[in-house]
Image: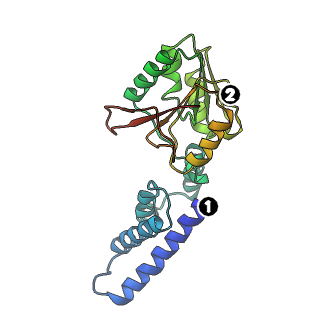
Amino acid sequence: MNVLKALAAQLLGAASTLLFIWLLPEFMHGAGVLALTQGSIAAGWSRLLRQPIWWLPIHVLFLPTALGLLLLQLPAWLYLLAVLILALVFWGTIKGDVPLFLSSTAVVNAVVRIVKQEKALAFAELGAGVGSVVVPLAKQCPTMVVTGYELAPIPWAITAWRSRWLSNLGVYRSSFWTCDLAPYAVVFAFLSPNPMPELALKIKREMRPGSLFISSSFPVPGWQPEVIKQIQDRGMTKLYCYRVR
């Protein structure tokens, strides 16, 4: 759905730019000006179409980047390779669900403290990315079973490689929508606002009473967190901790 919205935003940006050329021809000179104008307008349309905020820089930079690459006259196969690599890395973003977010060391340290307070024996991360949480967590909590679910091929491969010597960490290349959350005392996710309502239903349906769900940065709509932990990192991350009743 977000891909269709992105296409619509770009087309509307192009149409709006043509209108500006007709109305204000004295200001619309040069390919760079036109490209930046189109990208900025497309970003505006993106917000009106309610796309996630991380699409804004994509829209702004898409046409200027394309023009810059054309000036470089690179071989055509390089473009295909770049698109393929980006697709394998940002798999969730392309599908319109979840971008690739990396958790800070301060977030990891906070999660370690939480699982130790919970005396958790099993932990899962939904969307493990490149292992920025599950790998250090498995190292610091060797008696806890740690599981990561990641669908994007390249991030999954990186996490699997990083965890090759960690016997208590399992990394699965599968969608977290298909996994069962019942075995886990603590579940962690750093996703986006889009999947949270549906994820809330899955949590209520599968997680055991008394278990803990931690959402980094994005609250669950309509849920009251047991505690909100403010992390002192660059992004001033908040961890929303929800006790399953």
User: Which x, y percent locates residue 156?
Assistant: 60, 33
Q: Is residue 186 positioned above or below 235 on the image?
A: above
Residue 52 visible in the snapshot: yes
The residue that disc 1 covers is 1
Q: Is residue 4 positioned above or below 164 on the image?
A: below
The residue that disc 2 covers is 182
The answer to whether 226 appears left or right of 82 in the picture is left
The answer to whether 213 appears left or right of 207 in the picture is left
Task: Please say if the residues under marks 1 and 2 sit with CB atoms less than 8 Å apart.
Answer: no
| Element type at mark 1 | loop
When asked about the image quadrant of residue 18, the answer is bottom left
User: Which x, y percent locates residue 200?
Assistant: 59, 42
User: Which x, y percent locates residue 208?
Assistant: 65, 27
Which residue is pictured at 65% across the width and 40% down the height?
202
Which residue is pictured at 68% across the width and 37% down the height?
205
Q: Nearer the viewer, residue 39 or 106?
A: 106
When asked about the image quadrant of residue 39, the answer is bottom left
Residue 176 visible in the snapshot: no
Q: Nearer the viewer, residue 166 or 225?
A: 225
How many numbered callouts?
Answer: 2
* Few, some or many residues within 10 Å of mark 2 (<14, 14–19, 20+): some
Which residue is pictured at 45% across the width and 20% down the height?
112
User: Which x, y percent locates residue 115?
Assistant: 50, 19
Quarter holding the N terminus is bottom right
Q: Nearer the viewer, residue 167 or 240?
A: 240
